[in-house]
Structures are given as structure tokens and as C-alpha cells.
Amino acid sequence: DSSLLLLQEGIESGAAIAQFEQLYRKKPGLTVNVARLDANVNKNRYRDISPYDQTRVVLKNSINGDYINANYVNMEIPGSGIINRYIAAQGPLPNTCTDFWQMVWEQQSSLVVMLTTKVERGRVKCHQYWPQLYETEDFGALQITCVKEEETPSFAFREFNLTHVETNEERHIRHMQYIAWPDHGVPDDPSDFLHFVVKVRQARQAMVEPTIVHCSAGIGRTGVLITMETAMYLIEANQPVYPLTIVRQMRDQRAMLIQTSSQYKFVCEAILRVYNEGLVKPVEDFRR
Ligand code: PTR
Ligand code: PTR
């Protein structure tokens, strides 16, 4: 594929990184007014990371108001009819866990992907917003039980049952956590990372509701994951892969996705590897 040859050259010459560094981090013209309201400032983990008003997830039935630091990010795969739907969010704070679960419920999501640990280098990156294995915790109108937990050195896979205490409706949620990936950094092992993305893709199959993806700020690592998955779909759909176009498409929906040049380089190299090693192949007559 000529787009991937171009990418290979761009990585080798450094031109790809230079282009990434010139790309806008926030789309001009979009606003972040709701995030800045007095009632909402303590719901933001970082002062400099705010969701656009235009694409923010608006809570419908939260006791704390309609604001959460999260955006819809829809990634269209041209020529395939597919639109992959995500919600990119910050890691919950102690005072936003109930809002987070309310969002999961209202958006009918059945998959939460977490790309951070709770603490990194002695700093809290994300509150533990889920109960321990076999325990039940109440979050507003939702009662959550952890029914399964499996850990490997790099990942943790959990399952939760959610019950709406007013209607008694029950749902099942999968939780996939990538443990070995520090913020501002890249995964320790690209094979592990690709393995994880493949697992996320399997879990997402046939899901029309958005997948919720979060790290600590919900921009750096979240952006890398969405870029990688989008590239895999493009390869399968026999479409050119221009990572910068993917990043622009993401940043038009949530600011700053993919935080550092090394994260960008990492994901570009992972895309080339997937293509060159045939880990993902063009699908004949791509239709779903
Ligand atoms: N960029 C941050 C700021 O604008 O304040 C500084 C910062 C850097 C914050 C690294 C957190 C960082 O990660 P850690 O908490 O893991 O050191
Ligand atoms: N002010 C923080 C900083 O610049 O360090 C915000 C921030 C924190 C940005 C973490 C990105 C971070 O990484 P991630 O989005 O992968 O959690």
C-alpha cells in the first residue's frame, strides 16, 4: 500500500513527526465553556484538559448536573460503512465515579477500556471506581458487583454486573485494563500493546454502542489506542492509512488526543508492523 510506504519514509526522515508537531491540538472554533463553569471545575482531573462543548457527553439523569469530562469520538472507516464509536474520558475522580457509571448506563456501553494504573510514580492517576472481586458497591442509582477478575503482568480483565436499583434492570459490563503503560510514555512492549488492541477489537465486535476508553487525562494513551484500532480497520477495508488524518479526525472531537511525539512515532511504527507482518489483512469484499 503506497500510504504505508509513504509512512515508512516519513518516519525514517523525521518528516512524519514534524507534521505531527505542527498539527493543531485543539480545533479552532470549538469551545470548552461548560467544563469551566464553577460547578464543574472540581470534576476535571487536570486544569488544562477540558472536553469540547460541541461533542461532550451530556448526562441525562445525574444528581450532580449534566457535566462529565468525556467526548464522543466517532471514527468513520471510508468505503466500509463502518463507524467505530468511542467515548474518550478522563480517569474518574472520587467525586465523579457516580457520574462515570451513570454515563456507562445511559450510553448503553458494555465495554470500558482503561489504559492507566491507579497510581504511577507515587501520583494518583485514576480513582478505583469499581468494587473489588465479589464485592458490591452503590453508585447513585446503580449497584455494581465485580463478578470476575483475571490478571496477567500487562493486563487485567474484569466483569461487572450493573443493576439499576429503581427498575431492577441488569446489565453486564466488560472492563479491560492495560497496566504496563505509563502516562506521557509508550507501552513497554509493542507486541503486548498489539495483543491488547486485538483483544479490544474482539470484545467490541458487533457492538454499536460506544466503547468507553479512558486513561488519566483521557488524551495521550486513549488517542494511541483509537488510532491503532482505526488503522487496523482501514487496512482491512483496503483504505489508505494516513495517521495524521486519523489524529486530526480525533482532535476535531476531543482536544489533544495523542500527547507526545514519541507516542505518535510508537503508533506509526506499530501500524507498519501490523501491515508488514500481516497481523491484519485486507478483507476481500469488505462488508459487515
Ligand atoms: N505537564 C504537567 C503540567 O502542565 O503541570 C506537568 C506534569 C508532568 C504533570 C508529568 C504530571 C506528570 O506526570 P507524573 O504525575 O506521572 O509525574
Ligand atoms: N496537565 C497534565 C500534563 O500535561 O501532564 C495533563 C495530562 C496528564 C495529560 C496525563 C496527559 C496525560 O496522559 P494520559 O492522557 O495518557 O492519561
Image: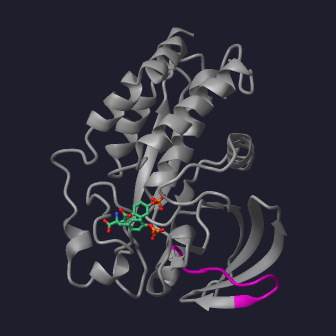
Q: Which residues are magenta?
A: 125-136
Q: Is residue 284 above or below residue 277?
A: above
Q: Is residue 100 above or below residue 73?
A: below
Count of marks, rendered view: 0
- Residue displayed at 52% across by 62% down: 215
Position of 276 compared to 29: left or right?
right
Type of secondary structure dominating the magenta stretch: loop
> Which one is nearer the viewer's eye here, 66 or 190?
190
Question: 183 above or below 251?
Answer: below
Quadrant for the N terminus in the image: top right
Q: Residue 187, image x and y in percent?
A: 62, 50
Task: Where is residue 163? Give x, y as percent.
Answer: 68, 81
Residue at 67% from the left image edge and 90% from the top image edge: 137
Regarding residue 287, the answer to whether it shows in the image is no
Q: Is residue 160 left or right of residue 107?
A: right
State yes or no: residue 280 in magenta. no
Q: Nearer the viewer, residue 65 or 15?
A: 15
Q: Position of residue 265 (x, y in %)?
A: 49, 35
Measured as percent of width and height from the top left, residue 150 is found at 84, 67
- Out of 237 and 132, give the one closest to the viewer: 132
**Does the magenta portion include 134?**
yes
- Left or right placement of residue 181 versus residue 99 in this view: right
Q: Which of these two is toward me, 182 or 172? A: 182
Which quarter shows the C terminus?
top right
**Horizontal arrangement in the rendering, residue 17 relative to residue 211 (left or right):** left
Looking at this view, name the residue that lies furthest to the left: 29
Say which quarter of the image contains residue 232: top right
Please report the residue visible at 27 percent of the width from the left and 55 percent of the height from the top: 54
Residue 11 in view, yes or no? yes
